C-alpha cells in the first residue's frame, strides 16, 4: 500500500526509489552473454529487455565486433525505447523481439554512458574494470573516464546507486588510497595530468 498513489497510476516495471539517487536512463553499457542455443546476434539487433519487472524494447550495439556467436560474451551498449531505473551491477535478460525466446542475459556496467565515444582499447579496459573491479577500482576508473571534467559525488551516486553522502565518502576514500586530486567539489585522476 502506497499512501497517495492510486492503483491506476502504477504500471508493470515502475520502480520506487529515494529521490535524488537514481535518474531514468534510455541507454546502458553492459557485458552480455548469448545463450549457447541462441542464433548468432548482429549489432543493431532488436530485443525485449527485462530488468526486474520492467520490459522495454531496445537494440543491442556490440562494441567490439559486428556479430556475437552462441555461447560468447561481449561488451555492448543497449539503447532502449523507454527510460528505466538501473544501477551498475544489475542483472538483466533479453529476448528476441519475435518469436519471444530468451536468448541471453547480462550485467549493467554503466547506466549513464557518455554518448558517441570511440571504442578504443582504453575504453574497453574501462569497461573491464567496471565488470571486475572493486569499488575503489571503479571510482578511480570513472574519474579517468570523466577526464578533465573530473567526477563529482553526484556522478558516483548515480552510477553506483548510492546516497550522495556515501558517494562523497567513496571519493574521499579513493582520494586517500589512490591519489585522486580534489579541486572544489570535483575529483580528478592523476593520470590525466
Image (cartoon, helix red, strand yellow):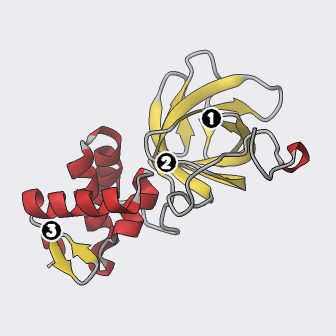
Residue 173 figure quarter? bottom left
Q: Which mark is residue 122?
A: none
Q: Which residue is mark 2?
A: 87
Provide residue 163's location: percent of width, then percent of height. Answer: 41, 56
> Tags 2 and 3 in contact by the CB under 8 Å rule?
no
Relative horizontal placement of residue 106, taking residue 171 as reference (left or right): right
In this view of the protein, which residue sits in the foreground, 43 or 152?
A: 152
Q: Which quadrant holds the C terminus?
A: bottom left
| Residue at image point 47% right, 27% down | 72
Q: Earlier in the sequence, mark 1 or mark 3?
A: 1
Badge 1 local density, few (<14 within 10 Å), some, or many (20+)? Answer: some
Q: Nearer the viewer, residue 132 or 64?
A: 132
Mark whose residue sits in front, 1 or 3: 3
Q: Where is 27 relative to 148, above or below? A: above
Q: Position of residue 76 (x, y in %)?
A: 51, 46
In primary-sequence order, the first of circles 2 and 1 is 1
Residue hosting label 1: 41
Q: Is residue 117 above or below residue 74?
A: below
Does residue 6 appear to the left or right of 90 in the view shown?
right
The residue at which mark 3 appears reads as 180
Amino acid at each position: 500500500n502506497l499512501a497517495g498513489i492510486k492503483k491506476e497510476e502504477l504500471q508493470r516495471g515502475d520502480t520506487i526509489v529515494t529521490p535524488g539517487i537514481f535518474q531514468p536512463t534510455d541507454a546502458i553499457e553492459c557485458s552480455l552473454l548469448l545463450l549457447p542455443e541462441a542464433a548468432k546476434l548482429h549489432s543493431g539487433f532488436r530485443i525485449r529487455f527485462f530488468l526486474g519487472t520492467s520490459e522495454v524494447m531496445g537494440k543491442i550495439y556490440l562494441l567490439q565486433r559486428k556479430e556475437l556467436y552462441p555461447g560468447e560474451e561481449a561488451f555492448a551498449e543497449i539503447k532502449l525505447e523507454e527510460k528505466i531505473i538501473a544501477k551498475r551491477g544489475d542483472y538483466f535478460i533479453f529476448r528476441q523481439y519475435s518469436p519471444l525466446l530468451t536468448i541471453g542475459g547480462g550485467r549493467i556496467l554503466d547506466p549513464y554512458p557518455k554518448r558517441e565515444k570511440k571504442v578504443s582499447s582504453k575504453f574497453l579496459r574501462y569497461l573491464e574494470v567496471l565488470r571486475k573491479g572493486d569499488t575503489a577500482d571503479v571510482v578511480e576508473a570513472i574519474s579517468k573516464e570523466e577526464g578533465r571534467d573530473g567526477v563529482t559525488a553526484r556522478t558516483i551516486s548515480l552510477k553506483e546507486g548510492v546516497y550522495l553522502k556515501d558517494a562523497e565518502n567513496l571519493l574521499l576514500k579513493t582520494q586517500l588510497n589512490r591519489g585522486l586530486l580534489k579541486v572544489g567539489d570535483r575529483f580528478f585522476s592523476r593520470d590525466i595530468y
